[in-house]
Image (cartoon, helix red, strand yellow):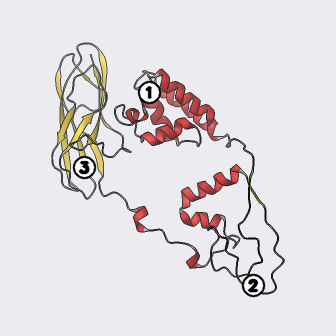
Amino acid sequence: MALLAHRLWELKERAGDPSFAEMSSRLGAAASKSSLAAAARGRTLPTWETTWEFVRVLAVDRLGQDERETEREWRSYWEQAGTQGPPASPAAESEPTQTGPARTGTVAEPAEGGLAEGGSVADGPAPAARPLRIRIGRPVVLGVLSAVLAGGAGALVAAFSPFGGEKAPDKAVPHESPAWTAQSSDDSVFEGDVTYPDGSTVRRKAHFTKVWRIRNAGTVPWEGRYLTRINSTPCRAPERIAIEPTAPGRTTDIAVRVRAAAGPARCKIFWKMTSEDGTPLFPAKKPIFLDVSVQ
């Protein structure tokens, strides 16, 4: 992972060292600035999608490298990083806060959480209490953290549960609050190119109108929204395009007037939906773009 992060930093420097916020907005990476920054830190292996968006906007869009060759090369780097385990670190020791004898018929509860409550054990005299030393290596900690990220708070309880894989009493597992899983009601779906599909050819200095069709797939009416350009090319296009008010479930066509370059060129222009004050919307979605060749 460290080698992959080093390569990402080198690529970023070769491409002019743009900020992560710039990569996520103006350059059109379909990943948040925090995800891009985490990929370059090398503490965890980023997803292939985040890695590719990091590489694509720099190596392909900014440096002009071949997209297929670049994707093949970096996919190999990413897969190699995935076969490497986390770096070894000295084991840490921790002492439990309670060393006294357990109460007969119940599981002793530590001073700070981690064990489920109310689990029963066999009746009978409790064995003499002995200090417990637990050695926790980094792989175990990383495994527990991964389980928590994948399964939420219930996974943390299960990881340290005294029931040995058996189901704990219902009251021992906290229910997840609906507020934690609520999905945004604001959403959009790209329906397609109405005019000048990707790869179209236009004449030098020609004026043409590109049209996209998108749908309001959420429950929030669209008011005061725009498509804002996030990069520059030899072709000329407006910085911002107004989007007509669109009710939930309805589609809208967005048109932009473009002037082709004066000489042979490839024009790939990206736009992202923003609010009236310029705040980016749907940061996880890929930008809408125009891709034509000028001959």
How far is disc 1 from disc 3 in space, using C-alphas? 30 Å
Give the number of the mark in front: 2 or 1.
Answer: 2
Q: Say left or right for 226 vs 74.
A: left
Task: Pinpoint residue 270: horizontal percent, then vertical percent.
Answer: 30, 32
Residue behind mark 3: 215
Residue at image x 45%, y 35%? 53
Task: Pinpoint residue 238: horizontal percent, then vertical percent.
Answer: 20, 29
Q: Is residue 135 visible?
A: yes
Residue behind mark 1: 58
Question: Considering the numbered disc 2 on the image, is that residue within a helix, a strand or a loop?
Answer: loop
Q: Label 1 neighbourhood size at 10 Å, few (<14), some (14-19), many (20+)?
A: many
Q: Label 3 neighbourhood size at 10 Å, few (<14), some (14-19), many (20+)?
A: some
> Mark number for residue 98?
none
Residue at image x 82%, y 70%? 130
- Looking at the rendering, which quadrant does residue 256 occupy? top left
> Mark number for residue 104?
2
Quarter the N terminus occupies? top right
Task: Pinpoint residue 125: horizontal percent, then vertical percent.
Answer: 82, 85
The vertical placement of 257 against 49, above or below, is above
